[in-house]
Amino acid sequence: MKRVYNFSAGPSMLPLPVLKQAATEMTDAHGSGQSVMEMSHRSGDFKPIIEKTEALLRSLMGIPKNYRVLFLQGGASLQFSMIPLNLAGTEPGAPKKKAAYVETGIWAKKAAEEGAKYVDLVLEASSQDRAYTYIPRPPAPHPGAAYYHLTLNNTIVGTRWTELPQTGAVPLVADISSSILSEPLEVSRFGLLYAGAQKNLGPAGTTVVIIREDLIGKAPSWTPVMLRYDIHAQEASLYNTPPCYGIYIMGLVLEWLKGLGGVPAIAELNRNKAALFYGYLDHSRLFRSPVEPAFRSLMNIPFVATVGDTGERANLESRFVQEAAAQGLVNLAGHRLVGGMRASLYNAMPIEGVQELIRFMERFEEREKGRTGVSHTNHE
Ligand SMILES: *Cc1c(COP(=O)(O)O)cnc(C)c1O
């Protein structure tokens, strides 16, 4: 068996022990004589699976009792609509409510664009002026805002918030799709947290929403039933058929994480992986990180080549991505909207993967020097 190191931003690598366990349970899960995919979501076979997944998530994240955990579908993108609708939606004819957004990247911008359909949007701050390479210092929010939305880790541009804004009584709402369980997070600082599963939790198809109880039940009467937090909370995520298999795999991923020592242990590993890779980039004569050091993501690390003109650079970058893939280092192309390259180092990426990527990049760099004769200038 030859496994590749998958640097994709999502769907991304899953821990090998999880895949192996899923394989052994594929045709007969827990002595039920069937796979998890075939089980009724209301059966006694499935109930312990969803309950175990929720209990593990609660203990790993330290989720307080007054928060509900919902397993939904539609990806993080559907939350861009559900959040404004449920937290600040209004009846027809009534004036829109205010909600605050900070634009720190492409997902943050999409969340705001969708939110603006339902709320009177207050753009607190934006880092678009410098291609989202930093996190702005936002002012205190409008006291009447229904919530304050931010994207904790910006997957495409590779930045992260390290200090949360003080929002007083205005509930903080955060997209944590690409950073959930990567480092400690104080859940009680937030009114609502959400994440698509396909980055740090499991396969695509499940979205986790963690919502403080007092924020449930504010949706206007016209809200489609499938988009109502109160319905999903009342029915314990079983209003309709949930993504059963995805929830089961998430449970295995969480068990794996617990076995490693939970969030503190994985956070240390993640910091080491990121430090190794940024350390390499900062000394490379061929590659560099475009992100300001204070705001660099631990999970998603974009990088660009520093040689020649745009055409030369694009040529080199596409050669880089192809040659890396041939060495089993796959999905290193940057997001289609920003170009360049990107290495995503989620929880399941072992440090050996990062070490192998760096060795490949050092060899590539050496060879490039000889090939083009270009004397690369050190950008430092
Ligand atoms: C991947 C991602 C999304 C989009 O997730 P989907 O589940 O595909 O809708 C949104 N926000 C962030 C921060 C992401 O990383």
Image (spheres, rainbow, N blue to C red):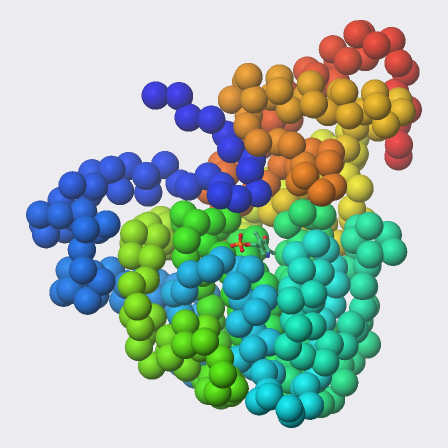
Ligand 1 shown in quarter = bottom right
Outermost residue on the bottom side: it is 94
Q: Nearer the viewer, residue 128 or 275?
A: 128
Q: Assign the C terminus to one quadrant of the image.
A: top right
On screen, 313 above or below 84?
above
Residue 276: name its quadrant. top right
Q: Return the x and y of residue 338 as percentages of the image width and height.
A: 74, 41
Name, please, the residue furthest toward the front: 93
Tell me: residue 138, above or below residue 38: below
The percent position of residue 302, horizontal first and vertical second, equals: 70, 40
State the image quarter where residue 191 is shown. Answer: bottom right
Q: Is residue 319 visible?
A: yes
Q: Is residue 223 left or right of residue 136?
A: left
Q: How many marks?
A: 0
Residue 285 visible in rendering: no
User: Left or right of 336: which side holds 215?
Assistant: left
Residue at screen point 34% across, 21% down: 1
x and y, in percent, of residue 346 in the image:
53, 45
The residue located at (60%, 47%) in the rendering is: 299
Q: Which residue is pictured at 46% across the width and 60% down the height?
A: 74
Q: Is residue 134 left or right of 330 when viewed as pictured? A: right
Above or below: residue 89 compared with residue 242 = below
Tell me residue 343's x, y (percent). 62, 37
Q: Which residue is at a point 71% across and 48% down the rendered structure image? A: 157
